[in-house]
Amino acid sequence: MPSNVNHRSAQSHRSLLEIANALPLNELPNAQTHIKQWIAESDRICTGTFDPSKPLPFDSCRGLPEDFFAAQLLDENVLQEIAGSRRFACITRNQLSWSATILFFEDSFEEKWLALSAREREKHLLSAFKQQEGHGADFSLNGQQKLICPELCWDKLVAGNGRGFLNLLMTLMLDNNDDPPTQPLVLEQPRFDAIIGWSEQCGLAQKAWLECRRVSRTQHIVRRQEMVHQSFTHEHSKTKETLSAAKPLVNLFMGGNKAKADQWVEDEATRRKQMKLFCENCFKSEDKKEGKMSACGPCKKMGREDCQKKAWKLHKRDCGKILGVDSLLQDVAPIHNPRQPSAREDIPAAAPGYRRTPYLLQQISFMNEHPQSDYIFYPDAEDIIIVTLDELAGAAVFNIMRNRCLASADESALFYLYRALQRSETMSGNAEQQPLRKQLLREYGTPFENVMKALDSGHPPAVPTVSPEDIDRMLVLLQKTSRFAVELRDYTPGAKGKKTVRRDFRVCSLHFILSSSGSQGGFEVGPKKDLSMIVDWPADTAVSTVTVAPLGMESVLWHNPPAHLVTGPGPNHRKCFPVSPRPFRLLMDFFTASSIPAPLEGFRRPALERQLHTLCEHPGADYVLWGQTDAPAVPHGVYFDDMYECMAFLAHRHQLLQKGAEGAPDDLAYVLMALETVLLRKKIPMNAVRAQLASEYGESAVRCVVGSIAGGVYTRAMDGKAFEMNAIPVQKGDVLEMMKQLKRAGRFPHLLDKLTEMS
């Protein structure tokens, strides 16, 4: 038989689950004409029912034997209806969670609800009660449902100046709106379990029936929170047979009054005939203008033709099969929604007991919509900024911290997340109004507020730690996304017994610096540089320790040294010279005060002069590349995030600038090999880099050196000696001088301070 929906009122539909949940009838005021009195009386009865000091009230199911449920209640028709009701409970919760998330995120519902006066909140709550509780105080099973829901007592809903209602609404929301539930929600209520006689020791048929009563009680609470209600029923067989199966329980409920029981069944059959058809797959009501819905042959489930095809993968498991009691509590097939993005595998479930805020649910939905993103920053509801780290280690550690935040709002991880997402060392304006703080406070609530208080007091939270197992799990997840295919090409999952190496790099906001341990790397995070952590990194990954990004992003990437740390000329220093039609003569006047050496022959190529001029304007960059061959106007800064690699590169650069390519082929080879290593995944092809260096240092010299490099080894033309990149000779004095200049320029402040003290 088709599935139906009734649009008349919540009281018009009474499913078998609502029959089952009925307690002894209580005379209540009319909910439509005397709603306040109805609430007061129903609250009084409910409070008495759930008073632990009082005896358990009568319940028609408590104490019945297993045979009663198996033989008289759970026939094929009832099982099908219960299974459908369970699926619908999952779907309505998903819909509630989605709509509530949008309400919180786009309409600032929390702030607006709390800002209402008590009278205004009362108006909305009374309207919801009237809408759900139907017409009058006659025999209403929906009305009886309210009597077993102490969560809906008025004093609890209005507690905390409206906070009680919000807390209940958030309790009903999912942990991930894009991961539809396959088991209906049960709000635990031990007193209710005792009243109906439910326990884990119940027989299979008894447990199935009573579990559905627990689901139905929760479903009543869910519908109350929706404010606007629609009632659905699932009818897979003939109405007469389905309702006949309920007669034993209805007779019990009516105290053995057969006439009343028969009248109820007759009324229920009439109501069911008035219900409208809806699609089993997407729950859209039938619209005659779009054509009549078709029914699945084996199981008679209704559905729009396109929906049936798309949902077949989920539906075929149960199609045409006769349900047994043992399969009644299995996972249900989620609703088919082609517009809903898939839940990402790398986003964890919430930890037991942790409740995600609606804003965090929206963050997760944004990330599900953008599967390559690491986080989403939204200054306002209509403008989002996708945060994606393009370096493997930075992305791995950031995502480990992000997942700890998503799972439990861990405060040390929140400290890391906040520092990593900050855009500058000093932020203007009232800190509480800053978009990032405001967003994270909404997403994580009290834990993030604690982090801010700790930072403001000068006592930051504990530094987070990352284990090799944490790294391994995240790398496996990143492997599946194919984001870092080159770096993870040779990675073998498993952390135990694996060799780790020292990795020193800075990725976007993540500054990976050297530690004195020799086989570990340290992250220095954010513009304030007040969070450092040690990480063991697996050796079987190809990790670039260099950031390559368009120039002009230094404030975002934290590659502009803070002004208070700059104490003198750095590696890129020149006096600020005016624009002049005679640049080459003017340049010679500045070499005496420059960290960039004067050329021995006194002249440089125009392309190299452009390189030096750009480096002068961007003191945090170690080299400048001009992008794709077909887009030479896009300059990219190369930033070495490993201090020792940075010093070595600058020392070789120093010799190359002073002697030229022909006088310093070893240094040109190092520069070429270093740049080729760091451009693993960049959008700048190596042939474009070689063409640029040829224009800067001479085509023949570059061609000669390029021909001397093969398989990661440079063979010197003069004597035939072979060197791996890190073994190419470098002037020790130049390296030490670069360290001093980096310190004066304010780069690697914590590490250089420590090394200076050690020396």
Image (cartoon, grey):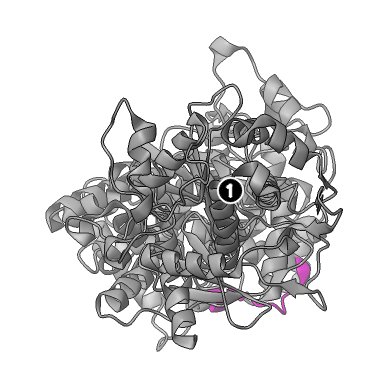
Question: Residue 206: where, in percent of width, then height?
Answer: 71, 68
Q: Residue furthest front?
A: 601
Residue drawn at (81%, 69%), measured in percent from left and top?
494
214 part of magenta stretch: no
196 part of magenta stretch: yes
Residue 270 visible in image: no
Part of the protein shown in magenta: 192-204
The image quadrant that residue 310 belongs to is: top right
Residue 47 visible in image: yes
Q: Give the class, few, some or many, for how many residues have Cα within 10 Å of label 1's Cα (few <14, many ≥20).
A: some
Question: Residue 736: where, in percent of width, then height?
Answer: 52, 71
Is residue 17 left or right of 222 when viewed as pictured? right
State the residue in front, 544 or 449.
Answer: 544
The image quadrant that residue 424 belongs to is: bottom left
Element class at badge 1: helix
State the residue in front, 667 or 560.
Answer: 667
Q: Which residue is mark 1?
A: 659
Residue drawn at (83%, 62%), measured in percent from left and top?
492
Question: Residue 539: where, in percent of width, then height?
Answer: 76, 67
Question: Residue 34: where, in percent of width, then height?
Answer: 21, 51
Residue drawn at (17%, 59%), measured in percent from left and top?
430
Residue drawn at (71%, 73%), measured in percent from left and top?
469
Is residue 69 left or right of 255 when viewed as pictured? right
- 410 w.r.t. 103: above or below: below
Three-letter amino acid code at the position of disc 1 = Lys
